[in-house]
Image (cartoon, grey):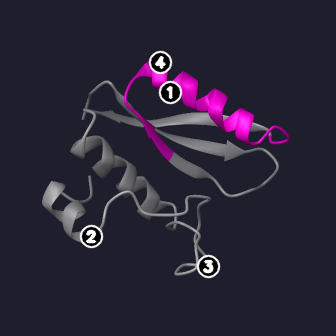
């Protein structure tokens, strides 16, 4: 699927957990990288574009797909999650209604 929105992986060179995120445009993707750097000034991150989709439901669907593929968020309900994300992007019902896995 093509679109102007971006789903990306933030990779921690120090071995921390990856993070899956989305941005609605190329410009917003660049801004998100700066925000990650500002919030984590000691970290050494690189970014990988995982896919592109139309902003809205399909971009969120793609992000949720990659969150699931990465082992899910790490939080109280899932302390052994594979990602630095704190939550899923979509609940299972909304994800299925949007089309589910790619």
Image quadrant assignment for residue 59: top left
Q: Which mark is residue 29?
A: 1
Q: CA distance from mark 3 to mark 2?
A: 19 Å
Q: Are marks 4 and 1 in contact (CB under 8 Å)?
A: yes
**Mark 4 Cα within 10 Å, few/some/many (few <14, many 20+)?**
few
- What residue span does the magenta drawing correspond to? 21-43
> For the residue labelled by badge 4, is the local secondary structure a helix, a strand or a loop?
helix
Q: Are marks 3 and 1 in contact (CB under 8 Å)?
A: no
Q: At 35% from the left edge and 30% from the top edge, which residue is drawn?
A: 5
Sequence-wise, the earlier of marks 2 and 1 is 1
Q: CA distance from mark 2 to mark 1?
A: 26 Å
Q: CA distance from mark 4 to mark 1?
A: 5 Å
Q: Is residue 26 magenta?
A: yes
Sequence-wise, the earlier of marks 3 and 2 is 3
Residue that label 3 marks? 79
Instruction: Give whichever of 36, 83 is nearer the camera.
Output: 36
Q: At 51% from the left edge and 49% from the top edge, which residue is drawn?
A: 20
Q: CA distance from mark 4 to mark 2?
A: 30 Å
Q: CA distance from mark 3 to mark 1?
A: 28 Å
**In x, y percent, where is residue 99?**
16, 56
- Give the quadrant of the N terminus: top left
> For the residue labelled by badge 2, is the local secondary structure a helix, a strand or a loop?
helix
Sequence-wise, the earlier of marks 4 and 3 is 4
> For the residue labelled by badge 1, is the local secondary structure a helix, a strand or a loop?
helix
């Amino acid at each position: 699927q093509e679109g102007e929105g971006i789903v990306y992986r933030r990779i921690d060179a120090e071995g921390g957990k990856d993070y899956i995120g989305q941005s609605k445009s190329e410009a917003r993707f660049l801004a998100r990288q700066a925000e990650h750097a500002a919030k984590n000034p000691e970290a050494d991150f690189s970014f990988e574009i995982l896919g592109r989709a139309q902003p809205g439901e399909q971009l969120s669907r793609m992000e949720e797909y990659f969150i699931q593929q990465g082992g899910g968020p790490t939080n109280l309900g899932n302390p052994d999650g594979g990602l630095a994300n704190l939550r899923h992007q979509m609940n299972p019902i909304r994800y299925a209604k949007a089309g589910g896995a790619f």
